[in-house]
Amino acid sequence: MTAIRATLRPTTSHAAFVLRRCTRFARLLGLALLGALAASTPLRAALTIEIIGGGANPIPVAIAPLGFEERVQQRITPVVGADLARSGLFKLIDPGGINPIPVEPGQVKYDEWRARGAEALAIGTVNPLSDGKIEVRFRLIDLVKQQQLAGFTYTITQAQSRLTAHRIADVIYEKLTGDPGVFSTRIAYVTKQGGRFELQVADADGVGPQTVLASPEPIISPSWSPDGNRIAYVSFERKKPIVYVQSLTGGTRQVVANFKGSNSAPAWSPDGKRLAVVLTKDGGSQIYLVNADGSGLTRLTNSQGIDTEPNFSPDGQYVIFTSDRGGSPQIYRVAASGGQAERLTFEGSYNVSPRYSPDGKSFAFVQRDGGRFQIAVQDLATRQVQVLTEGASDESPSFAPNGRLILYAAEAKGRGILAAVSSDGRVRQRLSAESGGVREPAWGPFLKTQ
Amino acid sequence: MKRLLVIGMAALLAAGCASKEEKPAAAVEERTPAPVQPPPPAPVAPAPEAKPLVTPQVQVNPLKDPNNILSKRSIYFDYDSYIVKDEFKPLVTAHSKYLTDNRSARVTIQGNTDERGSSEYNLALGQRRADAVKKMMQLLGVTDSQIEAVSFGKEKPKAQGKDEAAYAENRRDDIVYQGE
């Protein structure tokens, strides 16, 4: 994979922008709450629309078409705009009618953009280079303070223009919200069409899917290695569940766990050296730790019940998992070095599929309420639970690496689709509308810039 | 030898008849004359010559014979349960008998669940159903090396619907012999 070379230009801190937004946010939150009391309008009916709900206070940002971008096959500006719009946190200001479109800070007429309500403006140019590469220059401007918030020059190949667009969207997102963007990350999921299963990897917006594994038998539980270069998964191709680890760069794969009985639920340790897996070789489904090459197997849990769906804490100290040792499936936590497990969930009779948030302070999981399965988040310190979705069979939650979104599997018109919800429950989006079914999503890690 | 086995199975079926099962009972009725006739197994003497002739007759593989309980391979479970219900005990007993009589035979017990809930938790529930049948077979003398209990969880539903009938069909163990 060719790395994108990014040159950081001198920038002003984005802290001022974020702070200004926060004050305004607090003010608007009061208004929003009043509004909610007056008319609580559930926005869930709009499943056909990509974005459901939205931030209480979308940031008005204008994306000026990059100068000369018609010279390259994949235009960058529309991808940047779509990324930001999809997040639900931005209000895109139409640059139509502004002529000429500025491409350098000196050309920006601040009043013109402020009159349209924009608080920030992205500008730039695309220049084909003699060696066939492209130079993309991009700047983000704070229109209120009339300062540059960010400035980058990317030298890329034609094939990298989408990725570069996602990176630009990431910069805008980070400078304006304070959180890192995840538009340049990737997701994995399993499609089923007829009797064919495919493990695919695509951009976070679902574009550009690549098939990692195609099989006539099911594939479940994809899990990204922390460096994003490998995927562990469970394949039934040999008429039983076996855990494999496959390289995304070379395509080679190896068996990590193929013991008598079932082998499943792989989860990487944060250092990428080990996996937690679920084996039944000693009777019952129990959690084991194994090196990524399949060596050094040790048993982690020891119960009479089912112990499954392990997930490491971001600091590697703990493993959370699902167990029915107390009579119903609930979420427990055990030290990665072993020992006594501690029960974490107490509300409801079916709490499964726990996933730590990237900051390690909470976990997402699936809670059954009546006959409905919904995505919820529980704070580890306060034990407070917030149900985030309203579907009938929402499953397989997976945090975006910035912790702001949770990708999950849902059902629409009897078909499996992917959806995402912001971790505060405000914004919901549908990520995929492919034919056939899509299941078992897993959001990949941040890409290394170098 | 194979023939004797068929007789043995028929006898077993007759035994199964005592416990008020509808399907096994039907199978037994048709077969009732069989145990009576075979006792004079005359063809034993001209064995070397008759072999090619006898084989086609005996080739009715008990595992495939629709009249034989051994052709029945599915054990159904109640919702959220992995208890082998009484009505399926004759079936498990028959397969255990076959496996103890044929020590080279190997089976995989594939546990399945309905589609509701988490994939991995369902995989564990399916495993528990497969393990339940495995344990029963072991108590009946089948060796550990003859059985592998695995789970398909909710991944390979036999019935595709979203109603109780489909769910019930999918809460199931299947017994699959090696080579099938």
Image (spheres, coloured by chain):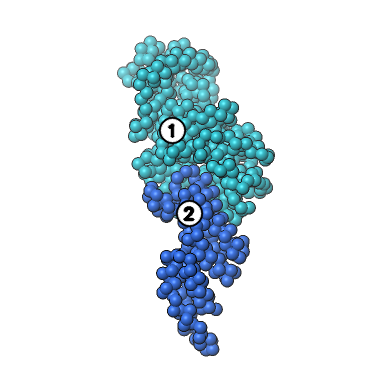
Chain colours: A cyan, B blue
Badge 1 marks a residue whose secondary structure is: loop
Dot 1: within a 10 Å radius of its alpha carbon, few (fewer than 14), some, or many (20 or more) residues? many
Badge 2 marks a residue whose secondary structure is: loop
The disc labelled 2 sits on which kind of residue? Phe
Do discs 2 and 1 belong to a common subunit?
Answer: no
Q: Viewer-proximal residue, A123 or B147?
A: B147
Query: Mark 2 highlights which residue?
Result: B77
The disc labelled 1 sits on which kind of residue? Thr
Residue under the point 53% across and 65% down: B93
Residue B118 image offset from top left, x and y in percent: 49, 43
Q: Residue furthest bottom?
A: B46
Residue A337, quarter of picture = top right
Residue A201 image offset from top left, x and y in percent: 47, 41
Residue A411, quarter of picture = top left
Residue B158, quarter of picture = bottom left
Tell me, yes or no, if residue B125 can be seen here: yes
Pinpoint the chain carrying mark 2: B
Residue A71 image offset from top left, x and y in percent: 38, 30
Task: Indicate whether A334 appears above or below A423.
Answer: below
Q: Is residue A28 left or right of residue A331?
A: left
Pinpoint the chain carrying mark 1: A
Query: Mark 1 highlights which residue?
Result: A389
- Where's the C terminus of chain A, which quadrant? top right
Q: Residue furthest left?
A: A97
Q: Viewer-proximal residue, A95 or A387?
A: A387
Residue under the point 50% across and 64% down: B91
Task: Indicate whether A360 appears above or below B91.
Answer: above
Dot 2: within a 10 Å radius of its alpha carbon, few (fewer than 14), some, or many (20 or more) residues? many
Residue under the point 53% across and 20% down: A9
Residue A431 image offset from top left, x and y in percent: 41, 35
